Amino acid sequence: MALLTLRHFPDPCLRETAQPVTVFDDELKTFVTDMTETMYAERGIGLAAPQVGVCKRVIIVDVSENRDQPMALINPEFIQCDGEMMMMDGCLSLPESYTETQRYSAVTVRYQDINGAEYTLEAEGLQAGCLQHEIDHLNGKLFIDHLSPLKRQRIEKKVKKTLKMREENA
């Protein structure tokens, strides 16, 4: 098990469309374990493979109260989206930046597990929002893309400043 290096905005990897996973082997299982460990170490509730520089359709989510129920979704795709909600959104790749975004309040997602078996997940509220956020990453989209140009510009500027300060203090 190893912690993976997070990619930060404006890393071009975050804007690529992730490719489907076609091989379900021990390498994938190790990668999912490393992604999960990285997500917890960074205190996130979700992580997508492009955020660690791997352009594959893999996400990890855990919105459980005790943060002990991680789910790995391979090749996730929406099959139904309903309702609307505003939710506080943030991203490990855009550190210390949070804002409200509009999301669907309920989603149904088809995905595969680490062995390739297919499942369907119905999610609401925070879990639905988290799934939308992470699947956006697989399509090269960031939460700031849901914002007005002015709000997006403010967050981009703040992220660049935060990352520069971190670099100077490292």
Image: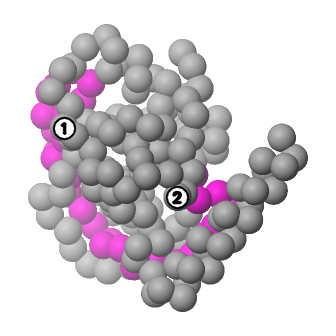
The quarter of the picture where residue 98 lies is: bottom right
Foreground pick, 70 / 137: 137
Q: Earlier in the sequence, mark 2 or mark 1?
A: 2
Foreground pick, 30 / 63: 30
Q: Which residue sits at x=21%, y=73%?
A: 82
Q: Is residue 163 left or right of residue 75?
A: right
Q: Quadrant of the C terminus?
A: top right
Give the labeled residue for mark 1: 20
Measured as percent of width and height from the top left, residue 97 is found at 63, 67
Residue 97's place in the image compared with 138, above or below, is below
Asked whether residue 45 is in view, the answer is no
Q: Residues within 10 Å of mark 2 (few under 14, many from 20)?
A: few
Give the labeled residue for mark 2: 10
Foreground pick, 43 / 153: 153
Task: Look at the numbered disc 1 and give the secondary structure of its residue.
Answer: loop
Q: Which residues are magenta?
A: 92-120
- Residue 4 painted magenta: no
Measured as percent of width and height from the top left, residue 108 is found at 20, 57
Asked whether residue 130 is in view, the answer is yes
Count of numbered badges drawn on the protein: 2
